[in-house]
Image (spheres, grey):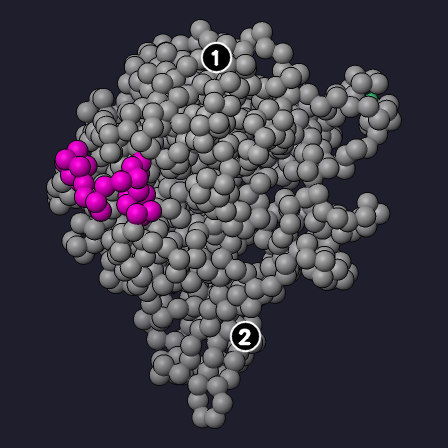
């Protein structure tokens, strides 16, 4: 009896009989199979969890499985065990978990079979096989056994399909009356590269003509998916093929532009040797690589990767963001040839990801995988080492779909295979460092910048009394900025707020333009000529009359990156250029790399950007970093607000003074007395840690307790919703007492209305996870059926909104 986890709704695990027309060995755990479901016998794809499951309970009708979708299992027993563990942890089914881990092409039943016999090969759809009689199926079964039948990958179809992508930044030269064109452009701008079929699904078949017009005018490209990745092309890279050109050396050193090749400093060598010894140990190990910004952590990772491969084991190097993963990938090509290195991240096309997944599943030799968090779920053979670079970064937690923390999954995988997990950071997660201090994770330190560069001077600029009408930058910040530009050096300005103005205030009636779905203020995007909700993407054209009074006079309040970029043009010496790096300026494929390259080549003197620019980039000519609004993250309703702010600001400060010239950092704040600043100024991570850990212990926050959020939402116009939330609160409190879990709430979520749904949350604190899970389980069981009320558990939330 086969036990099969379905990869699409209802995601349950069902029993199927192995049919007689295929040999027993055709069905193995870890294989994908097509199975019929329901009375109509529609086909689903599932994964065999067990090929020798006990018989189904009495009275349950068991159907026959239809067809195996591969000859060798796609997933190993270890992999299936990881899936089972994730399912337990998230109170989900294995099918739920697999459904979110496997690339789309591996979940579709639109698989074709090609039959080689006499004459021309014949192609069959799986559903044709479903309609066949017993005798015909036997013929197919014999062809399968004789090797005359092959399964065609869905990746072929994915590649054949076209995608649509906007090719010009807004504003677009389209008449306001051309509503369909504008709608389509806005849609594609928000979504990025979208398969043509999805666009047709959203806009109807008649959109073909509009797409045609836009393509003719050069505003939209329609064609086969190119690599949407921001990576430089394979062939123009100095680091390819093991040659280390100057650019490559700088990257390896993670901070110095000189030096004679890939030679480790004594500190780097010490760390690499220590890690190599840990890998060779007979039990699983975890290490923290704690090195200041610019201290050359990448070179240590690469040395470890090379060592792991020499031991015949695979390596994963994971970065929090695509741009950093691509950079790591280029550097990694110095240690590993083209056959054995894979890049995997969420911006690649589904077909590309599917091919990588299959290629890795089919391997027996070790390989090197570089990617973002989703790469963690590749079925890599003989895994030996996982490195999480910038381990403190919140992007390692997936918040949507299946919620998981990459660090925990990585830890589990390394426990399974007795491998080595390396966490690297200049500003480790407070929880990680607490584990290190408590002796659970040995630490390797890199305390100096490679090439002798020094950490920059950090100055606080009090902007309490500053009128923001003129400029967001205080006079002394502006003065320093002008001097840097006049000296021919470069500066970066961090402002973690994109768009032109975060608030639009009606001068006629005093109303603020708000999103009808979320009640959040709309942000004015000048170039796009729209007001946009940053939480749900809803947007309206601007200028347009006030919703409340039809007045036409708005005052943009506050300043986003777009406005800062604009205002700098008047404030800097003539001829200076300013570039902007944020989600809006990098929506088009390849733009991020283009902006970073242009800045690195010195084509602009100032780079304005959101937190994107704080991460890992290396600009030797930058001697000044200005943080325009240092307080922005400090007041968020999140127990980690200070930790986040500290990490962001130390990382941003780390962009200055990485070359030969020393750097300065200006942090503008309205709250200069906050305890965080003294540690930011000294780049004193350990001082910050000591203070922060004392506060957490006093207030009972992680790592001293386990913390989870239960989130509830229901449609704003559903009148029963509130009563259910109150019932759940009473139940949670009562069950919490029984399980030793403290239940706080319900409280409205900080985003109390999102996409037309009211949102509430409970915080659950307890000594261990099982009690917290048990309380949630009982809340879920008591919630009304019918789907109006959605209830979710976020274990160890990184985003409290
Ligand atoms: Zn008004
Ligand atoms: Zn909204």
Residue 760's tag is none
Q: Residue at x 40, y 42 (%)?
A: 324
Name which residue lies at 44% across and 89% down. 117
Please state the extent of the stretch shown in magenta in the rendering.
246-272
Mark 2 or mark 1: whose residue is earlier in sequence: 2
* Residue 62 to residue 174: above or below: below
Q: Is residue 592 left or right of residue 361?
A: right
Task: For marks 2 and 1, give the one nearer the viewer.
Answer: 1
Label 1: which residue? Answer: 461
Q: Is residue 633 visible?
A: no
Q: Position of residue 251 (x, y in %)?
A: 32, 43
Q: Residues within 10 Å of mark 2 (few under 14, many from 20)?
A: few
Label 1: few (<14), some (14–19) or many (≥20) C-alpha neighbours in 10 Å: many
**Which disc number belongs to residue 125?**
2
Answer yes or no: disc 1 within 8 Å of ligand 2: no
Work out how far the residue at label 2 is from the one at label 1, CA to CA, in angstroms: 68 Å
Residue at the right extreme, as displayed: 550
Q: Is residue 339 left or right of residue 65?
A: left
Q: Image point 28% across, 22% down: which residue?
A: 434
């Amino acid at each position: 009896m086969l036990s099969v986890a379905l990869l699409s709704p209802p995601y349950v695990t069902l029993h199927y009989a192995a049919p007689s027309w295929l040999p027993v060995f055709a069905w193995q755990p870890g294989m994908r199979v097509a199975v019929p479901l329901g009375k109509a016998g529609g086909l689903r794809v599932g994964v065999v969890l067990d090929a020798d499951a006990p018989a189904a309970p009495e009275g349950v009708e068991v159907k026959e499985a239809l067809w195996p979708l591969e000859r060798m299992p796609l997933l190993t027993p270890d992999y299936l065990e990881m899936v089972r563990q994730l399912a337990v942890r998230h109170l989900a089914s294995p099918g739920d978990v697999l459904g979110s881990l496997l690339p789309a092409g591996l979940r579709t039943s639109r698989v074709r079979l090609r039959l080689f016999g006499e004459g021309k090969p014949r192609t069959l759809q799986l559903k044709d096989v479903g309609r066949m009689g017993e005798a015909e199926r036997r013929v197919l079964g014999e062809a399968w056994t004789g090797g005359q039948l092959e399964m065609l990958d869905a990746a072929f179809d994915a590649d054949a399909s076209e995608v649509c992508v906007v090719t010009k930044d807004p504003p677009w030269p389209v008449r306001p009356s051309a509503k369909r064109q504008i709608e389509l452009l806005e849609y594609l701008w928000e979504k990025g590269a979208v398969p043509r079929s999805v666009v047709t699904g959203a806009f109807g078949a008649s959109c073909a003509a509009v797409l045609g017009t836009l393509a003719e005018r050069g505003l939209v490209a329609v064609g086969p998916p190119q690599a949407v990745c921001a990576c430089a092309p394979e062939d123009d890279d100095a680091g390819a093929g093991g040659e280390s050109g100057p650019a490559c050396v700088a990257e390896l050193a993670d901070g110095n532009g000189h030096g004679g090749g890939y030679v480790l400093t004594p500190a780097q060598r010490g760390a690499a040797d220590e890690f190599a010894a840990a890998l060779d140990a007979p039990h699983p190990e975890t290490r923290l690589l704690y090195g200041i910004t610019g201290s050359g952590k990448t070179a240590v990772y690469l040395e470890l990767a090379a060592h792991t491969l020499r031991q015949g084991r695979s390596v994963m190097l994971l970065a929090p963001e695509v741009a950093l993963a691509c950079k790591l990938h280029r550097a990694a090509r110095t240690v590993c040839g083209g056959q054995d290195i894979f890049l995997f991240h969420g911006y690649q096309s589904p077909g590309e990801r599917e091919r990588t997944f299959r290629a890795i599943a089919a391997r027996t030799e070790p390989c090197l995988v570089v990617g973002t968090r989703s790469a963690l779920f590749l079925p890599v053979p003989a895994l030996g080492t996982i490195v999480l670079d910038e381990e403190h970064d919140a992007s390692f937690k997936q918040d949507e779909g299946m919620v998981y923390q990459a660090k925990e999954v990585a830890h589990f995988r390394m426990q399974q295979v007795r491998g080595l997990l390396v966490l690297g950071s200049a500003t480790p997660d407070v929880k990680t460092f607490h584990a290190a201090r408590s002796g659970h994770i040995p630490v390797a330190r890199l305390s100096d910048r490679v090439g002798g560069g020094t950490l920059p001077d950090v100055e606080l600029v009090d902007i309490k009394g500053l009128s923001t009408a003129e400029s967001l930058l205080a006079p002394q910040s502006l003065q320093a900025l002008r001097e840097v530009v006049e000296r021919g050096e470069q500066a970066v300005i961090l402002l973690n707020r994109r768009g032109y103005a975060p608030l639009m205030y009606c001068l006629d009636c005093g109303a603020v333009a708000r999103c009808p779905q979320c009640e959040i203020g709309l942000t004015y995007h000048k170039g796009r000529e729209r007001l946009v909700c940053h939480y749900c993407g809803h947007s309206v054209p601007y200028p347009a009359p006030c919703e409340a009074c039809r007045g036409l006079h708005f005052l943009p309040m506050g300043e986003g990156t777009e406005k800062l970029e604009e205002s700098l043009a008047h404030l800097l010496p003539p001829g200076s250029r300013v570039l902007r790096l944020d989600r809006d300026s990098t929506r088009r494929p390849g733009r991020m790399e283009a902006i970073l390259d242009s800045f690195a080549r010195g084509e602009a003197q100032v780079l304005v950007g959101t937190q994107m620019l704080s991460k890992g980039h290396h600009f030797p000519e930058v001697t000044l970093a200005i943080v325009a609004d240092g307080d922005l993250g400090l007041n968020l309703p999140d127990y980690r607000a200070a930790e986040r702010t500290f990490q962001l600001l130390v990382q941003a400060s780390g962009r200055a003074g990485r070359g030969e010239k020393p750097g300065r950092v200006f942090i503008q704040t309205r709250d200069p007395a906050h305890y965080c600043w003294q540690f930011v100024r000294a780049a004193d991570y350990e001082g910050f840690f000591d203070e922060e850990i004392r506060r957490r212990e006093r207030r009972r926050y992680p790592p001293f307790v386990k913390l989870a959020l239960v989130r509830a939402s229901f449609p704003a116009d559903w009148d029963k919703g509130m009563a259910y939330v109150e019932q759940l609160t009473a139940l949670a409190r009562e069950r919490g007492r029984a399980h030793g879990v403290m239940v706080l709430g319900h409280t409205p979520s900080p985003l109390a209305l999102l996409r037309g749904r009211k949102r509430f949350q409970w915080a659950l604190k307890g000594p261990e996870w099982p009690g917290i899970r048990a309380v949630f389980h009982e809340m879920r069981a008591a919630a009304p059926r019918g789907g109006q009320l959605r209830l979710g558990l976020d274990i160890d939330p990184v985003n409290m909104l």
